[in-house]
Image (cartoon, grey):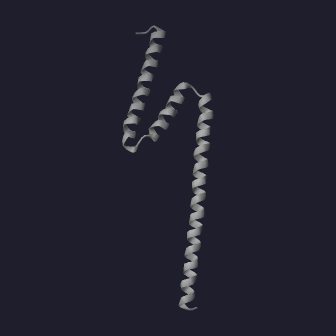
Amino acid sequence: MQMKHLIIFALVGMVALLGFNLINGNQREKDRESITTSSSTEKASTGVTESDSNNDEKNSSVDITSKPLGEQPKAILDSATTQIEQAQQADQQRLDQSGVQ
């Protein structure tokens, strides 16, 4: 084979690989979009049947991931603090109901 033929063959191969990558990349983006829309639909449908505390946990986790990366640790701590306070209030209510102080 002549060098000219090898160069043409290599260029054709590179163009074919580039086209394959573009098509495959677009398909992956479509798959990601469909996954995110289906997962948000599942969250909406399951949120109706779960208790309010579970909904608060889901909403806070969604809120945390939507915040900028620098604010996420503070949001996680705030969420944990809120959950701890709610648990302490529930314990206090149970103790008050049982009459033990």
Question: In which image quadrant can residue 95 be found?
Answer: top left
Figure check: 18 above or below 95: below
Looking at the image, residue 79 sits to the left or right of residue 5; the answer is left
- Residue in view at x 48 percent, y 10 percent: 98
Figure check: 18 above or below 51: below
Which residue is farthest bottom? 2
- Residue in view at x 42 percent, y 21 percent: 88
Q: Nearer the viewer, residue 15 or 42?
A: 15
Looking at the image, residue 12 sits to the left or right of residue 69; the answer is right
- Count of labels in the image: 0
Q: Quadrant of the C terminus?
A: top left
Q: Quadrant of the N terminus?
A: bottom right
- Residue in view at x 57 percent, y 74 percent: 15
Q: Nearer the viewer, residue 90 or 69?
A: 69
Counting from the top left corner in percent of width and height, residue 54 is at 53, 29
- Residue in view at x 59 percent, y 42 percent: 39
Counting from the top left corner in percent of width and height, residue 27 is at 61, 58
Counting from the top left corner in percent of width and height, residue 48 is at 61, 29
Figure check: 89 above or below 64: above
Counting from the top left corner in percent of width and height, residue 44 is at 60, 34
Question: In which image quadrant can residue 2 be found?
Answer: bottom right
Which residue is farthest top? 99
